[in-house]
Amino acid sequence: MSASTTERPACRISVNGTDHDFDGPTHTNALDFLRGEGLTAAKEGCAEGECGACAILIARPDGDGTTRWTSVNSCLLPAAALDGQEVITAEGLSAGDHIHPVAEEMAVRGGSQCGYCTPGFICSMAAEYYRPGREEFDLHALSGNLCRCTGYRPIKDAAQALGTPEATDALAARMT
């Protein structure tokens, strides 16, 4: 008796505005998929979802036709679970000469030393930056991110220095 095989269709994942196909092994996590696509800002720190070095943003429907940007640990998420989803990595937040306000505040305030955890912090900060109705930065948004170099004061300073997104910010426009 021979086992029948069925071909699994490739997953289509939008990453930083570009469609990518994923047809790899089902055990491949989102972090390994992204790094395989040449997007290396997200890092593997603990591979257990404890350090946040691999954080990315995922667009989630908010139930009323708007988008909510959610930070997730890509080391825990199967790549195939992103089929039809939109992902923004730290690379995708800044483009060309444009530096995202979160990345700019991290640089200005000295929130990065070795830089290993910085992209994850930036994605987690960006999710809070874009939170609808945010009046001040909720530092709990960073509770899943660890830094071993800077201490947390400059990172906290960067988070608290963030204003609100500009009206022309494409990611913010998705929330309205």
Image: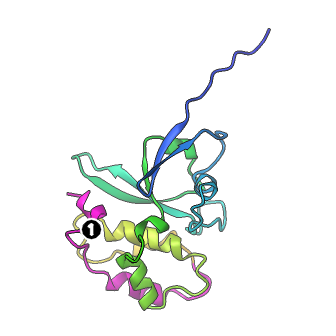
Q: Please state which of residues 165 and 159 is positioned toward the viewer in this rendering.
A: 165
Is residue 156 covered in magenta? yes
Is residue 108 covered in magenta? no
**Does residue 118 appear to the left or right of 60 in the view shown?**
right
Q: Amino acid at mark 1?
A: Asp
Q: Please state which of residues 157 and 9 is positioned toward the viewer in this rendering.
A: 9
Q: Give the magenta-colored segment's residue range.
A: 147-176
Can you give x and y, in whole percent of width and height, for residue 27 in the image? 66, 43
Can you give x and y, in whole percent of width and height, for residue 95 in the image? 41, 70
Point 60% across, 52% down: residue: 33
Can you give x and y, in whole percent of width and height, for residue 127 in the image? 38, 65
Q: Is residue 10 above or below residue 127?
A: above
Point 52% across, 42% down: residue: 81
> Which quadrant of the figure has residue 172?
bottom left
**Does residue 39 appear to the left or right of 98 in the view shown?**
right
Q: Please state which of residues 168 and 49 is positioned toward the viewer in this rendering.
A: 168
